[in-house]
Amino acid sequence: MIDLYTAPTPNGYKVSILLEELKLPYNVVSIELEKKEQKKTEFLKLNPNGRIPTIVDHENNDFTVFESGAILIYLAEKSGKFLSSDPNGRSVTLQWLMFQMGGIGPMQGQAHVFYRYAPEKIEYAIERYQKETLRLYTVLDTQLKEHEYLTGDLSIADIATWPWVRSYRWAGLDIENLPHLQRWLDVLAERPAFQQGIEVPYKIDRSKMTAEQTQEKGSKILI
């Protein structure tokens, strides 16, 4: 059994989606970020950086892994799925995984912050991070023009990237001119594991929300 410490964020969704794809048994421990539960002493013993997600693998002597990309690699190697055993294929997947972790995550995260949350609207910062995120999206679109998935076959690179790109509207972006990226988003959105993974640690019922409430709630889900 694996314990997954998580919250409804793109980085959290990466791991729950992979666990669902792998059909590995796991127990969800919901971390309330607004209550700073990730900064409590007991959690910092698991993840000294005080971030989600984190896993504890009880089948492997309670081995603990933090950092979402490291967790994806660990689970892929544990299961032998979504990461090629061929050195070149493995390298390609890791390149696109690092592209997400070093590019899309940080840049889109800053776009979210300055576009949605900053008490002062700094147009330079908004434009800078939106433009860079869109540039990175264009790189993805070019890759997906020739590949069904980022590395040919479905991999942890796709699983890492999709939860971020799906929230493009929250960063104030439009992907109408990126048809291959949109196709990829839609294809992955149809996979049951992706649908189930974004309901962890809990499902959001938007059916009774107003449009304004949905936006407000979404800020806690997509960032």
Image (tube, rainbow, N blue to C red):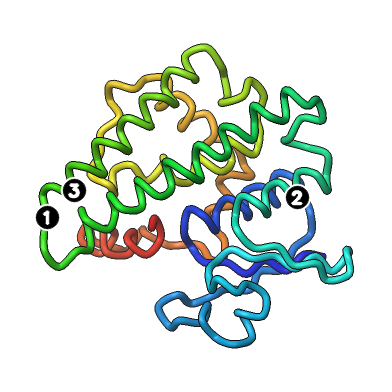
Q: Of helix, strand and loop, which one carries label 1?
A: loop
Q: Which quadrant is the N terminus positioned in? A: bottom right
Residue in the picture at 63% in, 53% down = 15
> CB of mark 3 within 8 Å of CB of mark 1?
yes
**Callout 3 crowding tier (Cα within 10 Å): few <14, some 14–19, many ≥20:** many
Q: How far apart are marks 1 and 2 (CA)?
A: 40 Å
Mark 2 / mark 3, whichever is N-terminal: 2
Left or right: residue 28 compared with residue 207: right
Q: Which quadrant is the C terminus positioned in? A: bottom left
Disc 2 designates what residue? Answer: 75
Q: Of helix, strand and loop, which one carries label 2?
A: helix
Question: How many numbered discs, if any?
Answer: 3
Which of the 4 quarters of the picture holds residue 29?
A: bottom right
Q: Residue 35 in the image: x percent, y percent? A: 43, 83
Disc 3 designates what residue? Answer: 126
Q: Which amino acid does label 2 sit on?
A: Leu
Residue in the picture at 88% in, 64% down = 60
Disc 1 designates what residue? Answer: 122
Left or right: residue 177 compared with residue 79: left
Quick check: 69 above or below 151? below
